Amino acid sequence: MAGFVGRGRELARLDGMLARVERGGRAGRPGRALLMRGRRRVGKSRLVEEFVERAGVPHLFFTASAQPTHAADLRLFVAAAAGSTLPGAGLFAGQAPATWDAALTLLAAALPTDQPSVVVLDEMPYLIATDPGFEGTLQKVFDRELSRRPVLLICVGSDLAMMEALNDYGRPFHQRATEMVVPPLSPGDVAEMLQLPPADAIDAYLVTGGLPLVLDDWAPGETVRDYLAQAVPDPTSALLVSGERALAAEFPPQSQPGVVLRAIGSGERTSSSIARAAGGIPQASLHRALRLLTDKRVVEATLPLSTRPSRETRYVVADPYLRFWLAFLDPYLAEIERGRGDLTLARIHSSWTSWRGRAVEPVIRESLRRLPPGHLPSGTAEVGGYWTRINDPEIDLVGGDRSPVAKRITFVGSVKWLEHGTFDGHDLARLLHHRVQLPGADDHTPVVAVVRSGRAVDGVTALGPAELLAAWRD
């Protein structure tokens, strides 16, 4: 990756937080805290490193590890603090605090009082896991010491549910910190980074999910086919390794959530089909696994969008990269490791068009939600899809004033993500046939087509890759 791409919105927000610290606060409390969360390998640490480097202020960057006891992390913290750029870093020399209370109090003494500073606690969930009292200790020291100094405390974590819960009512840190979610790089960032035309950039996003580490291995201007040709046969490539590392700790292959996740990743979407693909897992176990996966934001539970309530829940892997990895790489890692990545690659090429047509739909829906007014029929606030138990009808795109139960349907649409494929009269006739079966739609409901290439028949609003990418630009 040439330089640091994207993250303009996130960097601006961090700059604003540091500016508030510099301006000071009421009652002599200029200190601020930020809880930053995002999926694993999404670039949270890299973002904070870039922010600290640009800010040029004294800082401490500590990354916790999955040590069996908190004593090991304490030693690592002291070593990181002693080597930091804080003016009082020398206070840590030769010190061996036995508790986090003592270590954080020593940190407060090492902070400057005449200029702002930044303290980063990366992988904070590890600290809480090894020391359940850490959360309360941090709150106490923050209230008594850190908030009285011009410091920005950034707590970073990949466990989305845990990091979100830290600011909940009843938790020690409630209302003491600002929250920030770091998403993957957007399709627009991918296009800029890889210097690809819009359609190819969206395809690249389906493979990488916007993960910076995976994109690092992708040469600018390289096609999806060329990239896969060098990444898939290599067992050490970021494309293969990132998925393994992201799931290994939380969802081992033989754990029930891991089995259910892999069933969803293989293409199953309903609870009954997931249960069958998971080897006939009992319903109670299936529901527990699905609840855990959705709580952790690894899986999304979606409902049809119409004016009528529905219970036809479908489950989809939330991260585009994991969708690709689970479908094409995870089942064949042993094959790749024994030097037959060519078989895996051939399998990807033979299934690419059909898999891509389904995988691109969530990305298109999110892109349409982000479009400024004027691109979609007025009143559109949500974009989803519609289906029934037997998938007749099944509509790719449905716009509404709210979801999942809309008061008004604003449009229906179809996705045709083919190399060469115009949305023709046959496609329109099929969509119109399905439109009359959609609760809330009628003969006057507008029609939209999203096409990868080509155009749409007259009378249909057509959107292409360029419009989708524009929706992601800051």
Image: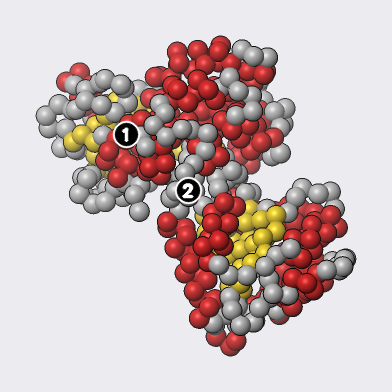
Q: Is residue 331 visible?
A: no
**Disc 1, SS:** loop
Q: Is residue 15 visible?
A: yes
- Number of residues whose C-alpha sits closer than 10 Å to that of mark 1, classed few (under 14), some (14–19) or many (20 or more): some
Which residue is located at x 32 percent, y 41 percent?
469
Residue pointed to by mark 1: 197
Taking depth in this image into account, of 29 and 174 the one nearest to the observer is 29
* Image x and y of residue 245, in percent: 66, 36
- Number of residues whose C-alpha sits closer than 10 Å to that of mark 2, classed few (under 14), some (14–19) or many (20 or more): few
Which residue is located at x 55 percent, y 22 percent?
232
* Image x and y of residue 96, in percent: 87, 66
Q: Is residue 168 above or below residue 205?
A: below
Snapshot quadrant of residue 89: bottom right
State the colouring used for the structure image: secondary structure
Residue pointed to by mark 2: 3
Instruction: Name the kind of residue labelled 2 in the image.
Output: Gly
